Image (tube, grey):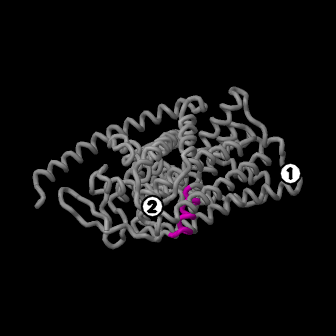
């Protein structure tokens, strides 16, 4: 049972239901990474680096893979919800830093889910029926909230089905590429082309890598589900690392196929329809509607996993006393954090209704890279905190190198556009305001608890 103190009284909240074994966790990791990132980013990455667009995806995988080692050691030591924010709190004990890390991670999840809701209505569903985008987005978020509330078992089983469907779309692209190469089509020389028209080759590669990195995030969301996994200390290492290898392999094969069949300039011009362009060139008779239908399922899966993560993050922080205890409330029958589900879903609805979230993609990657750098440092700090049980241990050199690479990709040296920093500053400003509101609320609740005394 999870002991949560709420509004001055001690309440025994039921524990979250442990339903995820190694296979479900593997599908969770793969489904979260694959998401809609590669569908949307292939054209943008090609525009930055040229025909060698497989290289940024590979480098992004290397940086993410090293950071995953830090997450695995930390989730082994502290197998609880809240992920990066929990590790930051344990390592540094600075409530403001913990809150801002949590805010950045929550932003990544909710904006990704909101982007998926918009893509669902405005892009993929529009291929079949025209409906008001905002209305579709709101209904979409509410439906996800109901699935989330229904139970994690139902949610992760739905994820397995949806992951298989979205993987089929990428396998179609790879299959088209293989068939085209067998028949003598494709231009292998494009695979080593690097666009240096207005920058050095290093900046071209790192700029594209900082963008491609957004397609590799998602593995870190799984640690927020630790309290709903069977034996998380044992199953996390294999599930997370193999999930990342599967996702990265598919990304590299898709990017190679895309570059072989379509010039980088055409991919960049196609933007989010880059893979459809590849399909048109490699298999002109293939029905676009099938790929649009697969895209529908891909955005549903991406949004579902991100909303699961965001609600568990708030739940975990409530148990760590960083957020008001009300966010730790668990429904007695469904065993899901219902208050956190309602709160995160309400924010997603507001974003879908009133905010242009298309500008948040690059900034979300920027904030997550900062979070990853903090997690890698937190691991080194927490080496002094010993636990009784055995757990995964990362070689010391790996988190050190991962932190350095993450900081480099955050810096202007990587070729990151100034707009990412501007939007990031605005988001962090909102986070500071929310931290102050949270501080006032918690101080008021603490005063009430002191006034009422132990007996209430």
Please say if 257 is above or below 154. above
**Secondary structure of residue under mark 1:** loop
- When asked about the image quadrant of residue 247, the answer is bottom right
Which label sits on residue 185? 1
Task: Identify which residue is drawn at 42% across, 51% down.
Answer: 348
**Foreground residue among 284 and 338:** 338
Left or right: 184 in relation to 445: right
Assess disc 1: are there few (<14), some (14-19) or many (≥20) residues with their C-alpha within 10 Å of its C-alpha. Answer: some
Asked whether residue 307 is in view, the answer is no
Which region is colored magenta? 21-32
Task: Identify which residue is drawn at 67% across, 63% down.
Answer: 168
Task: Identify which residue is drawn at 40% across, 57% down.
Answer: 387
Q: Position of residue 140 (x, y in %)?
A: 47, 59
Asked whether residue 208 is in view, the answer is yes
Q: Quadrant of the N terminus?
A: bottom left
Q: Position of residue 218 (x, y in %)?
A: 53, 53
| Closer to viewer: mark 1 or mark 2 | 2
**Secondary structure of residue under mark 2:** helix
**Which residue is labeled 2 in the image?**
225
Is residue 28 within the magenta segment? Answer: yes
Q: Residue furthest right?
A: 184
């Amino acid at each position: 049972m999870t002991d949560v103190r709420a509004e001055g009284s001690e309440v025994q909240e039921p524990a979250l239901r442990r339903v995820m074994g190694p296979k479900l966790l593997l599908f969770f990791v793969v489904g979260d990474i694959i998401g809609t990132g590669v569908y949307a980013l292939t054209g943008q990455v090609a525009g930055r680096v040229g025909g060698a667009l497989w290289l940024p995806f590979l480098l992004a995988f290397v940086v993410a893979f090293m950071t995953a080692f830090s997450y695995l050691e930390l989730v082994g030591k502290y197998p609880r919800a809240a992920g990066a924010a929990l590790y930051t709190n344990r390592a540094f004990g600075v409530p403001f830093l913990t809150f801002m890390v949590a805010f950045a991670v929550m932003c990544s999840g909710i904006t990704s889910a909101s982007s998926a809701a918009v893509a669902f209505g405005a892009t993929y569903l529009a291929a079949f029926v025209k409906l008001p985008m905002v209305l579709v987005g709101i209904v979409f978020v509410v439906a996800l909230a109901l699935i989330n509330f229904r139970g994690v078992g139902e949610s992760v089983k739905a994820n397995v089905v949806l992951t298989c469907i979205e993987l089929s779309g990428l396998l179609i692209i790879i299959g088209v590429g293989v068939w085209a190469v067998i028949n003598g089509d494709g231009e292998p020389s494009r695979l080593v082309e690097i666009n240096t028209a207005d920058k050095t080759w290093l900046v071209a590669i790192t700029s594209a890598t900082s963008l491609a990195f957004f397609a590799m995030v998602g593995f870190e969301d799984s640690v927020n589900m630790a309290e709903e996994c069977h034996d998380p200390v044992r199953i996390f290492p294999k599930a997370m690392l193999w999930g990342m290898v599967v996702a990265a392999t598919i990304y590299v094969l898709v990017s190679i196929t895309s570059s072989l069949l379509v010039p980088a300039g055409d991919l960049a011009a196609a933007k989010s329809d880059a893979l459809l362009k590849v399909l048109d060139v490699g298999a002109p008779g293939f029905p676009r509607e099938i790929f649009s239908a697969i895209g529908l399922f891909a955005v549903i899966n991406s949004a579902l996993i991100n909303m699961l993560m965001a609600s568990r993050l708030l739940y975990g922080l409530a148990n760590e006393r960083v957020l008001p205890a009300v966010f730790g409330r668990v429904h007695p029958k469904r065993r899901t954090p219902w208050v956190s589900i309602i709160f995160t879903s309400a924010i997603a609805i507001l974003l879908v209704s009133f905010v242009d979230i298309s500008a948040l993609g690059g900034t979300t990657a920027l904030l997550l890279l900062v979070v990853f750098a903090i997690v890698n440092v937190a691991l080194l700090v927490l080496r002094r905190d010993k636990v009784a049980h055995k757990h995964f241990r990362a070689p010391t050199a790996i988190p050190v190198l991962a932190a350095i690479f993450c900081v480099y990709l955050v810096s202007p040296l990587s070729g990151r556009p100034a707009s990412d920093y501007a939007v990031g500053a605005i988001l962090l400003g909102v986070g500071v305001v929310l931290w102050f509101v949270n501080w006032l609320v918690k101080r008021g609740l603490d005063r009430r608890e002191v006034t009422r005394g132990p007996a209430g």
